[in-house]
Image (cartoon, grey):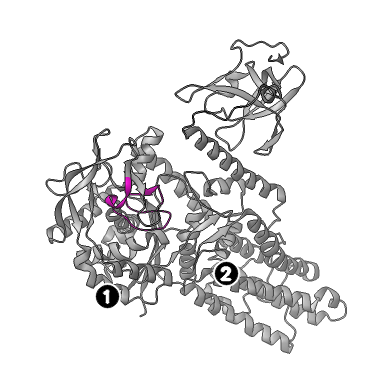
Amino acid sequence: MTYKRQLVTAALPYANGPVHIGHLAGCYLPADIYVRYLRSKGEDVKFICGSDEHGVPITIKAKKEGVTPQQVVDKYHKIMGDAFNGFGISFDVYSRTSSPTHHATASEFFKTLYDKGVFVEEVTEQYFDEKANQFLADRYIIGTCPKCANENAYGDQCEKCGTSLNPTDLINPKSTLSGEKPVLKKTKNWFLPLDKMQPQIEAFIESHKDWKTNVYGQCKSWLNAGLQPRAMTRDLDWGVKVPVDGADGKVLYVWFDAPIGYISATKDLFALSPEGRAGEGWTKYWRDKETKLVHFIGKDNIVFHCIIFPAMLMAEGSYILPENVPANEFLNLEGDKISTSRNWAVWLHEYLVEFNGKQDVLRYTLCANAPETKDNDFTWKDFQAKNNNELVAILGNFVNRTLVLTHKYYEGKVPEAAEYTKSDVLLLEEISKYPAKIAASIEQYRFREALGELMNLARLGNKYLADNEPWNLYKTEPKRVQTIMNLSLQICANLAVLMEPFLPFTSAKLSGLLNLNKSLRWNDATRTDLLLTGHQINAAALLFDKIEDEAIDAQIQKLADSKKMNETENSKAAIQNSKEEITFDDFSKMDIRVGTILEAEKVPKADKLLKLKIDTGIDQRTVVSGIAEHYKPEDIVGQQVSILINLAPRKIKGIESQGMILMAENEKGELSFVAPTKPNMNNGGAIK
């Protein structure tokens, strides 16, 4: 079917933490590539996203940080929105589910289903924390997964095996609020009868056998197991209030609430436009059957976007259903699962600071390693290799050589192609095929394959230059060199157009270097005359710089420090009677002295670390200490400390730490110095 327009959504990220590379590889980058491609073709497309600001993860984060849920979502909504924008994710709107528009839209949607008699009202037993005096939503309960024996499965899903669960499925459940075993207590909720809707849902899934195998397969697995009614309300005080009588203290289930966020975000988008202000322009994107709806998600969201949300839309009756739901698998980091709780992640907002101007290097690496059919791995060494061996050595090298030679031979003006050899004609034919090749892969959601074809065009250009060696022919065959350079420049122009969905920052830079017409679109890249004879190009500049080992080693060390810190915190949390005995000889090996802090400063990009300069009495040395959460640098200059000086040095955040200061911790986790409290600027001495 041919569609008049497309509505593309990317999964609403939870506003309880920043965006990491797993999120990008899972749905945001592929969605952005797809949308940029459609725009380049001149198609009518809207790209919708926003922060998911309700649900238990938000309230858990708020309790942990000692702030309100609203403060949590305000903080992370801004961090995520700024990071997406800085990375070039080109949403038409980035809205939020705490907005008045969303609350009104979600309430109206629920009320419509309620008035139609869709819901089943049931009084059921739900876990209740007697100590905290509240009902426990899914994520406030952890226990052992009945499928894989993971001891930290949540009440709605096991994140280890991916199984969807009900809280009562858990073995040995406990409350995350108090750690106590919860009791069952009766409460009333409204259920979506997925069991009764199964034939309708099954017909919908069967009409989409062309979906990615991981998506279709997971849906079939759910259907084969038999769908069960699912509660669409929760006993919580944070979220969209249930808009019916007798629902005090209840909010909409986050997975009822969140996907409606796509609709409310579209309303917000059109509210800002003349079309939207003149009427309900958003409706043609949600209610016109000539609109193609595509959801980009990660594999953990398949059931919600392919079964539950379509069931909601079917029950409401006035909305279109998704035409495709391309879901990626998971991206791991350095051979280990990305974990926000363990800080085992590459955070986008930090990357943008630490690798300023290298957005496209990460976009390229994540797309080249996209977990499209199976889990894949990101490593910093591979990131470096992708940049140095591919972006620099192939794409950047070809473009730079072409531009430099054009300036050297023709003062930066495009030379006329004098005459074509047989190999030139074949090259021209090959160039013209690339837009269709890349487009076919993008339209099948095979972005890794599409990127590979783009790089094949760069390789083709590199090989053409290397085979024809214009630098050796310039004096003897000047006409031939004109043709070689003309064709090389045409390839550069085609690359500038075709790379825009993948590498938008580089595309803009290359277009500027070529002084290229900004109105060029995708199909223009089938031509091989985008740069006319005599066209003036700008001075050559490198598209990419090499990334040195030092920058990569710093990132690997950052992860190692995070892992070590996490292990230390876990060991603190573990209940231990005592460590194994040591002898006096073991203890006497430690050289502990009283030293004086001469200087103190924060370690950049490390919230917990201070860099100290300490006078030990025998020398002055640098020590990196994790006390920044307890002491301000200016408050501890002159403080005497106990310092272990014969500890082997180690690098922390690139700083060599030459010892360890000893601290004491009370029952509240507060640290104090193990040394006289009054400053003494005399030289230190050994502790006997």
Between 538 and 86, which is closer to the camera in this rendering? 86
* Residue indicated by mark 1: 203
Amino acid tagged 2? Leu
Q: Which residues are magenta?
A: 150-172
Quadrant of the drawing holding the N terminus: bottom left
SS state under label 1: helix
Between residue 383 and residue 459, name the one nearer to us.
383
Q: Residue at x 31, y 57 (%)?
A: 259
332 horizontally vs 585: left or right: left
Dividing the picture into quadrants, the one containing residue 585 is top right
Q: Quadrant of residue 554?
A: top right
Instruction: Please give the label number shown on residue 451.
Output: 2
Q: Is residue 154 magenta?
A: yes
Horizontal side of 306 relative to 516 (left or right) equals left
Q: Nearer the viewer, mark 1 or mark 2?
A: 1
Q: Residue at x 31, y 36 (%)?
A: 180
- Residue 518 position within the rendered picture, expressed as x and y whole percent measured from the top left: 56, 66
Majority secondary structure in the magenta region: loop
Q: CA distance from mark 1 to mark 2?
A: 35 Å
Q: Is residue 587 magenta?
A: no
Query: Residue 74 vs residue 235: left or right?
Result: right
Residue placed at 79% from the left, 79% from the top? 468
The image quadrant where one finds the C terminus is: top right
